[in-house]
Image (cartoon, rainbow, N blue to C red):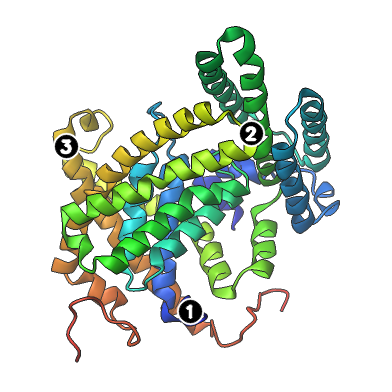
Amino acid sequence: MHPANRKAFSPVMASRDPGGMPGRERQLSAGYKMMLCMALSISAFVARTPLPLLVLFLLNAVVLLWFRRGPLTLKREIRVLCWQIFIITGLYVLRFGFQSGWVPGFLTAIQLFLAFFPGVIFLQTTPQTQIVMTLEKIMPSRMAFVLAMSIQFMPLMIREIRTIYEAQVFRGARILPSDLINPKNWKDVLHCLLFPSIVQCMVAAHDIATAAKARDFGKFSKRTHWPGG
Amino acid sequence: MKSLFNLNRLSLKESLFIGFCAVFIVLLRAGLRLHLGIPGHSMLFTVFFLMLARACVPYRFSASFTGLIAGIMAVVLGLGKGGPLILLKFLPPAIVIDIGAMLIPAWHNRYLFCILIAALAASTKFINTYFVDYLIGMDPTVNLQHAFIGSVSGTLFGMAGSLFVPPIMGKLNAHGIIGRHFGDNPEVRRHGEEKT
């Protein structure tokens, strides 16, 4: 993905692929990172007592520091953890009472978080290009191409939809967030935003397919890359 | 088996359209961050775009393909709660939509069929939540309650999302847009389409 496009997309995507510390990413390939994080994730389903959970928590922290390529933002993950602890511990307390319910509830919430957190580590510390190249090795080339193109053209689609949205607002469509409080205006979203966006998707799909065919896509069973053969 | 899942039956532009539907699912699910504070609200767009992909692309597993792409994309981009288990959020409803579409050929023109298929598809959230919580070792009663809360609201949102499908499909068909974009694959023929 072009760096300019990446910046244009969103801060969420930009934060997944920080540009700093290029030397560290050579420590481990994306495939090995993926396997290690999956192993950590699976381990969370096995660890059910406080001590193994603590060890796993520390292991996650070590892996996070090892893979780290720049500043990380874990605000969203911490918010998920807090919300999960609140919901699950609450349900356990309702079921078993406070005395015997809060400890198992808390441990289950932590366990659930540790099952998901390695995935977050992997994604926050691995560039998207490396992930896509790894996926190309493990899935059919057509699917990998579609996946790569969808990710690559995501910023373009967002720009197109934003353009449609702004044009429709100028035309008087009632699709501003304040208008959507009234359910009567929801049909404007359907007709003025959703429908043109879907048509725009079809046009983009047609254009990309034509461009790919012009470059002999599908002629060889193994997809070739430029540069790099 | 190979011919059953043969991706070559999909033209490249159909595959790419499916990819874009998956992009919309992922973006609207987590990118736009609908902070409604209601569990299951993401089913609104998930079910809508899965059904749209199945209705527009005449391939019997197009919803499953969309779900798979969306799941992998969510894993790749780190949206949602992350981890490989996020695939479970997209695949089961997609498979149900494909099965529903196989059983009811003209489903996308009728609100009732859309709601029915969407309800069944969105209710798979119960299985997904229950399975993950079961693997964690959660107490069965708490697990049932946890899965039930998520699946009921998910089903309602999924049914609401399916209500967008008939008008969109009606409009796309009325303007001949689907035929213009996806009408050049001789191997497959849309339901009700005459042979030429």
Total number of numbered discs in the rendering: 3
Q: How many C-alpha atoms fall within 10 Å of the one at disc 1: few (<14), some, or many (≥20)?
A: few
Residue in the image at 64% along x and 54% along y? A128
Q: Quadrant of residue B126?
A: top left
Q: Amino acid at mark 2?
A: Gly
Residue in the image at 45% along x and 54% along y? B92
Among the two numbered marks 2 and 1 on one chain, the one whose residue lies closer to the N terminus: 1
Residue highlighted by disc 3: A185
Q: Is residue B33 above or below residue A217?
A: above
Q: Calculate the distance from the C-alpha at mark 1 to the C-alpha at mark 3.
A: 42 Å
- The reply, left or right, for residue A5 in relation to residue A15 is left
Q: Amino acid at mark 1?
A: Asn
Q: Calculate the distance from the C-alpha at mark 2 to the C-alpha at mark 1.
A: 38 Å
Q: Where in the figure is residue B85, as x and y percent of width and height?
A: 59, 47
Q: How many C-alpha atoms fall within 10 Å of the one at disc 3: few (<14), some, or many (≥20)?
A: some
Residue highlighted by disc 1: B6
Name of the residue lying farthest toward the top: A99
Q: Calculate the distance from the C-alpha at mark 2 to the C-alpha at mark 3.
A: 45 Å
Q: Chain of mark 1?
A: B
Of the 4 image quadrants, the one containing the C terminus of chain A is bottom right
Q: Where in the figure is residue A192, as x and y percent of width and height?
A: 21, 49
Q: Chain of mark 2?
A: B
Q: Amino acid at mark 3?
A: Asn
Q: Is residue B167 above or below residue A119?
A: below
Front residue of this view, candidates B65 and A173? B65
Q: Secondary structure at mark 3?
A: helix
Q: Where in the figure is residue B133, as x and y percent of width and height?
A: 57, 36
Q: Which mark is residue B137?
A: 2
